[in-house]
Amino acid sequence: MQKQDFEEIAAFRALDTSEDPEDVQLAESGTASAASQPPLDELQGVAAMLAYSVPLPKLSPNLKQRLFQQIQSTTPQAEFLSTRAADLKWQKTPLAGIRIAKLYENPQTREVVGLLEADAGAVYPQHRHILGEEIYMLEGDLVIEDQVFRAGDFIRYGPGSVHRAHTQGGCRFHFRTSMDDQFLEPLPSSPFSP
């Protein structure tokens, strides 16, 4: 092996970045000449000092809290959840003629999944979606931006989208959205409040 090759392998080893088992074995075995050991020691010293040569960045005061929230939100949740139709808990909302049954809430991601049931003529006021919205129509009609959606139709709006909806004859649909959607018309409280 040439001296230059050994020094490159030794540099990778000093930084603990070599993934080739032969390189690691060669650098650790000392099969190179004794003259090559001082450069390896020097490189390891330089590698150790690199971490202390960079100024520390200013950390956000809530970094620890955000990291723990991120860890918690990426922790696998229970793999199975079910709700029987007989166990649905329909709740009135501050919106006239509209009820929801929450199926799932995730406080870390702020996601809510459920069913919405609206009487004929009910209006869902103009609102902005924080994470987006998905709707699967189960029955009736839902009018959004002059489009009429019926049973079997799927609707998806991306984050930041704004719209208003109403029903002519009443409807029921499955939804997935954020607990933090912003209502652009005055409401006494969010329909997703506990």
Image (cartoon, rainbow, N blue to C red):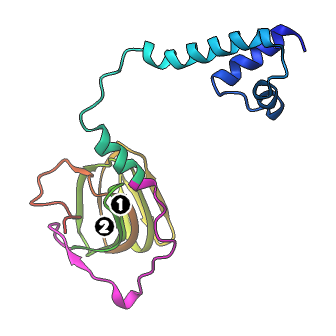
Callout 1, which amino acid?
Val
Q: Is residue 117 left or right of residue 125?
A: right
Q: Position of residue 34 (x, y in %)?
A: 79, 13
Residue matched to label 2: 167
Q: Position of residue 175 (x, y in %)?
A: 39, 65
From this view, report whether residue 136 is shown above or below residue 57. below
Q: Is residue 76 left or right of residue 96?
A: right
Q: How would you rate the neighbour count of disc 1 (Cα within 10 Å): few for under 14, some for 14-19, many for 20 or more?
A: some
* Quadrant where the image shows the N terminus: top right
How far apart are the alpha carbons under marks 1 and 2? 6 Å
Secondary structure at numbered mark 2:
loop
Q: Position of residue 73 (x, y in %)?
A: 40, 55
Q: Is residue 141 left or right of residue 34?
A: left
N-terminal-most mark, 1 or 2: 1
Q: Residue furthest right?
A: 1
Say which quarter of the image contains residue 116.
Answer: bottom left
**Camera-nearest residue between 153 and 43:** 43
Residue matched to label 1: 143
Which residue is pictured at 37% across the width and 15% down the height?
55
Q: Residue furthest left?
A: 188
Callout 2, which amino acid?
Thr
Determine whether label 1 and label 2 are within 8 Å by CB. Answer: yes
**Camera-nearest residue between 23 and 124:** 23
Which residue is pictured at 26% across the width and 80% down the height?
90
Which residue is pictured at 27% across the width and 52% down the height?
181
Q: Is residue 91 magenta?
A: yes
Which residue is pictured at 42% across the width and 63% down the height?
135
Q: Residue furthest bottom?
A: 86
- In the rendered structure, which segment of residues is drawn in magenta? 72-97
Q: Is residue 137 left or right of residue 36?
A: left
